[in-house]
């Protein structure tokens, strides 16, 4: 298990975890993607579900940290997505309503090269074990490209990408709904990140992935 | 109970729930704040907790809608915050680990004046009943002012506001941790929205509020 119990956050507050750096813009030239995320298993045994999924997920190619509210994976995009994918797959089980919420991000002007492993190769550790998994999920996403006037164009293109990916995008206030298989949704989050990253110095892609919801929505 | 079971999202996809409008910029001149949010009660009885809290919260001064992933309150800021506050208070109970995640937003260029009640007065409906509630929570926030180059300055000022509000802001990657009483955290979300709204045509303020977590963080 690579996730560690983090010491409580401390020190003066600023952005992106670098309290003592001026806005250096360094974040935009680094290859570090990150995701802060939380798992919500709607069961009395939530702690056991979360801890065992964290333990069973191979996060050895990312920097991983857990506090009382959320966890963090940082590193190469392929490994951040792979660890998220593995974690959700490990935590899910028949009859359990499980939700993961997270924010994939890159380029915060205050980011630094700490808390990340970038020397790794590009071979995902978790995907091979769940490549055949068929897990239908409902999802929503919202994309926030920061510091740029053309952000609406990027968002609109991502919605079209979801359509082409067969993820049935539907507009709701403040987000876009998706539905499909877990692996296809996770592939899409990776694809969106690769599309937006060279077009926006700093972006945040928020997502919610839900399995096993008892709520029926009539088509 | 004002929350209704929404029909499934349908129609062509675009932003902010207005599939047939061009990017009109109308959103920036409307007074409509909105919040898409989810409650996560970590218990086998999660459905009962969510549905009873929605039923006990007076959301009659906002437009409210629920789908399988999240719910929506839209209207005047005072009432959106008031309904969120009431909902979390109603859902919380001793021994329950309860989390709410949401995004408060205003100004999407594709927004319209639909799905909102703006004719209401400014008297909150839920706060009087829970003004004396003392509910310690852990929280995190992230602010995304969109379409503007100066977004970092707004974010930095909001962190300073949290310090002045006594909410112990601490930096973590991609977010700012807060801690304090539920009512003070909700007051702060309202204050941040009032501060950012005139300074950013379009912004999103994401938040996580957590009560009853068993995870200990040593100071």
Image (spheres, coloured by chain):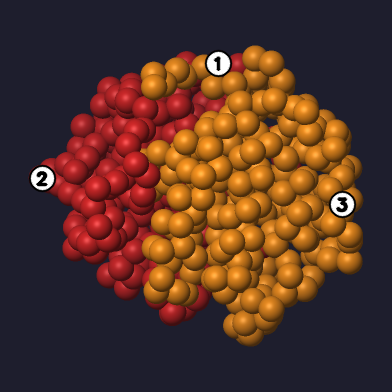
Chain colours: A red, B orange
Relative vertical location of residue A157 with respect to residue B106 in this rendering, above or below: below
x%, y% of residue A112? 21, 51
Q: Same subunit under labels 3 and 1?
A: no
Relative vertical location of residue B149 with respect to residue B96 in this rendering, above or below: below
Residue identified by numbered label 3: B123
Residues at discs 3 and 2 in contact (Cβ within 8 Å): no
Residue identified by numbered label 2: A119
Q: Residue at the spot x=41%, y=56% of the render? A: B156
Relative vertical location of residue B146 with respect to residue B52 in this rendering, above or below: below
Relative vertical location of residue B196 with respect to residue B55 in this rendering, above or below: below
Q: Chain of mark 1?
A: A
Residue identified by numbered label 1: A45
Quote the CA–CA distance across marks 2 and 1.
Answer: 37 Å
Which badge, 2 or 1, comes first in the chain's sequence?
Answer: 1
Which of pointers 3 and 2 indicates the residue nearer the eye? 3
Circle number at residue A141: none
Residues at discs 3 and 1 in contact (Cβ within 8 Å): no
x%, y% of residue B195? 59, 61
Please name whichever residue, B96 or A147, is drawn nearer the observer in this view of the structure: A147
Quote the CA–CA distance across marks 3 and 2.
Answer: 57 Å
């Amino acid at each position: 298990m690579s996730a560690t119990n983090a010491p409580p956050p401390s020190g003066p507050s600023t952005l992106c975890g670098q309290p003592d750096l001026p806005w250096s813009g360094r974040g935009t030239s680094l290859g570090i993607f990150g995701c802060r995320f939380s798992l919500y298993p709607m069961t009395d045994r939530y702690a056991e579900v979360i801890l065992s999924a964290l333990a069973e997920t191979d996060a050895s190619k990312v920097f991983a940290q857990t506090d009382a509210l959320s966890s963090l994976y940082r590193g190469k995009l392929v490994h951040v997505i792979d660890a998220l994918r593995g974690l959700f797959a490990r935590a899910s089980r028949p009859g359990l309503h499980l939700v993961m919420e997270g924010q994939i991000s890159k380029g915060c002007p205050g980011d630094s090269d700490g808390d990340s492993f970038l020397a790794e190769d590009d071979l995902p550790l978790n995907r091979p074990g769940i490549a055949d998994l068929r897990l239908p999920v409902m999802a929503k996403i919202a994309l926030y490209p920061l510091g740029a006037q053309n952000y609406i164009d990027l968002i609109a293109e991502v919605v079209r990408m979801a359509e082409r990916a067969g993820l049935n995008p539907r507009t709701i206030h403040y987000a876009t709904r998706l539905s499909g298989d877990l692996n296809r949704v996770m592939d899409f989050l990776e694809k969106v990140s690769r599309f937006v990253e060279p077009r926006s110095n700093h972006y945040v892609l928020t997502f919610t992935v839900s399995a096993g919801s008892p709520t029926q929505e009539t088509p």
